[in-house]
Amino acid sequence: MSHPLFPEMPYLSWRDTLATVHRFAQLVGKVRLAASPRRNHWWNVPFHLTGRGITTRPMGRDPIFAIDFDFLDHRLDIATVEGVRYSFALPGLSVAEFTAQLTHGLAAAGVDVTVPQPHPFDLPDAHRSFAQDTEHHTYDTAAVTRYWRVLSQVNLLLEEFAGRWSGKTSPVHHFWHTFDIALTRFSDTPVKHPPTTDPVTREAYSREVISFGFWFGDDTFPEPAFYSYTTPEPDGLTKEPLQPKTASWTERHGSHLAVLRYDDIRSLPDPHGTVLDFYESAYQAGARRAGWDRARYATRAGATDPYA
């Protein structure tokens, strides 16, 4: 059975489910943060995709373990390299119940990990611990599976886009902070942040970057969209053209995003190619204005060998 490329995904239709799953993911992401060796720009922290959902990847030492969300059977799986497994169903759980199940499952698997700040990060209820959150409990299985399928489609699209550049680039990864999927290109130029800048931002943006991604929307921008941004934002960035014509520069939190709305490409003859053109136009805009050596890092179809 085939599924449409970029199916309908209106934000309001699964807003409550998104809020619940986002908090599930944040708690598991904080376990990943506590149990994984640190990498530059926090690359150790986000999720990666699997054939059934998303995974933390292996972490810890004694035992080595991983946590996977299965968005087809709608379960959370905790597994160790010794073969110990603990699994539980996701539908019907509040965030508090999910927290209790996860805590019990980790203990049953012999995993000893402490989450230093067990509450949401940068969400409206950041003051409340996950263990006390009985408010968020909606889980629409069809919407969650659709979210994962869209995520999978965008993942491969970003992987293809990644092959067009040979400089330092992040993996394609799913951030539990903002619940987006992203790929970031880095220049060699360090960025001097003021001492008041928070440590998360200082590490994430310690070099000039141009980032590309997709997010599912929130209450301030209630629709899914593809995006790109350049940080630090160079002068005149918003004067640069974007492709297709429906894409635009949008002000958000004091800087500008290149935005292509999901619903503007769904019915096009080649939505995949249109999104790649959008990312390329946003890259060219940022790299040109920031003075990056675009020719040095350009590749063709993922190959750096000139004879390929």
Image (cartoon, rainbow, N blue to C red):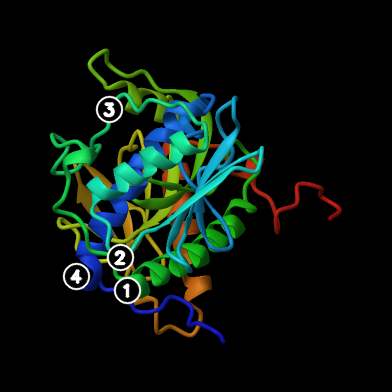
Of circles 3 and 2, the one toward us is: 3
Q: Percent from the top left, x then y, of residue 256?
A: 26, 47
Disc 2 secondary structure class: loop
Disc 3 secondary structure class: loop
Horizontally, residue 229 falls left or right of residue 139, namely right
Of circles 1 and 3, the one toward us is: 3
Horizontally, residue 166 falls left or right of residue 116, namely right
Mark 1 vs mark 2, CA separation in Å: 7 Å
Residue at the location (51% across, 33% down)? 44
The foreground one among 258 and 62 is: 62
Q: Earlier in the sequence, mark 2 or mark 4?
A: 4
Answer yes or no: do the residues labelled 2 and 4 have beta carbons within 8 Å?
A: no
Which residue lies under the disc numbered 4? 12
The foreground one among 298 and 217 is: 217
Which residue lies under the disc numbered 1? 9
- As drawn, 52 above or below 181: below
Residue at the location (59% across, 51% down)? 162
The foreground one among 105 and 141 is: 105
The kind of residue on which mark 2 rests is Pro
Answer yes or no: do the residues labelled 1 and 2 have beta carbons within 8 Å?
A: yes
The kind of residue on which mark 3 rests is Gln
Mark 1 vs mark 3, CA separation in Å: 32 Å
Residue at the location (36% across, 23% down)? 202
Q: Percent from the top left, x then y, of residue 34?
A: 43, 27
Which residue lies under the disc numbered 3? 117
The kind of residue on which mark 1 rests is Met
Q: Residues within 10 Å of mark 1 (few under 14, many from 20)?
A: some
